[in-house]
Amino acid sequence: MTVLVPHPSAERGHVDHGWLDAYHSFSFARWYEPHHLGIGPLRVLNQDRIEGGRGFGAHGHDNMEIVSIVLSGAIEHEDSSGTHSVIRPGEIQIMSAGIGVVHSEMNHLEDETTELLQIWIRPDENGLPMSYQQVQADPLIGESLPCLVSPEGGERALRIHQDAYLYGGAFTNESQASHMIAAGRVGYLHVAKGTAVVNGEAYGPGDGAYIVEGGEVEIEGRSDQGYLLLFDLIGQ
């Protein structure tokens, strides 16, 4: 039987620096909550709003799989490998930091706030070469959950160096989908926008749930212009 442990939006960490308004589902930076340290290899899930013309200047990472999903606006990415790209709504980016990378993420739209999801997942091996992928996914939840990230990758899914699958996308009040998390695996649900009913319980913007025992996860959209993510992860 599926066991979901609710993680209400109000329990997330929150910082407002003026140019950056950020919510942390798991302990991050100066916000530490021992009950919310992530699950499986999933370490960070931040929902950020970045003021026009501002962003994260050059900084380094290593040994982390970093996924970025833009909900509105755009983010300009530059890194020490020479990659220069812009991520827009409907696009998914993954950067395998590997042995080390320096990058910046800026909202280059001077008059528009950008909202994005930042996800960090520990790799299954340290010291890998740095790599970058980006795909136009336009995920819409219908009768199934679109796969955004997987160990195998695919035409519309990015490859990750971990036994981790990320499903989800936009939903409407007519969306219905389900996903089976196998026994021995764990998961996490995050409703970024809108409202949805998951296994009979209502979830609003920012709400999440730990999936601590595998089973069926049934999702019903309850609003238009919603967006949610479902992580299916190796237990650790």
Image (cartoon, rainbow, N blue to C red):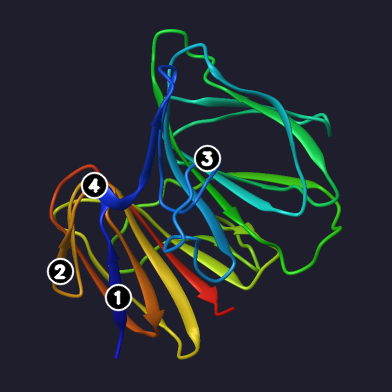
Q: Compute the Cα span from label 1 to label 3.
A: 27 Å
Look at label 4 and name its amino acid: Pro
The residue under label 2 is: 201
User: In the orientation shown, which residue stands out farthest toward the top?
Assistant: 110
Q: Compute the Cα span from label 1 to label 2.
A: 10 Å
Look at label 1 and name its amino acid: Leu
Q: Which of marks 3 and 2 is in front?
A: 3
Q: Is mark 1 on a helix, strand or loop?
A: strand
The residue under label 4 is: 205
Q: Compute the Cα span from label 1 to label 4.
A: 17 Å
Q: How crowded is mark 3: few (under 14 residues within 10 Å), some or many (20 or more)?
A: few
Q: Residues within 10 Å of mark 4 (few under 14, many from 20)?
A: some
The residue under label 3 is: 30
Q: What element carries label 4?
A: loop
Q: Residues within 10 Å of mark 1 (few under 14, many from 20)?
A: many
Q: What residue is drawn where x is 15% and y is 69%? A: 201
The residue under label 1 is: 4
Look at label 2 and name its amino acid: Glu
Whichever of callouts 1 and 2 sits on the residue coming sooner in the sequence is: 1
Whichever of callouts 4 and 3 sits on the residue coming sooner in the sequence is: 3
**Which residue occupies the foreground of this view, 10 or 200?**
10
Look at label 3 and name its amino acid: Arg
The vertical placement of 205 against 20, above or below, is below
Q: Compute the Cα span from label 4 to label 3.
A: 23 Å
Q: What residue is drawn where x is 45% and y is 91%? A: 183
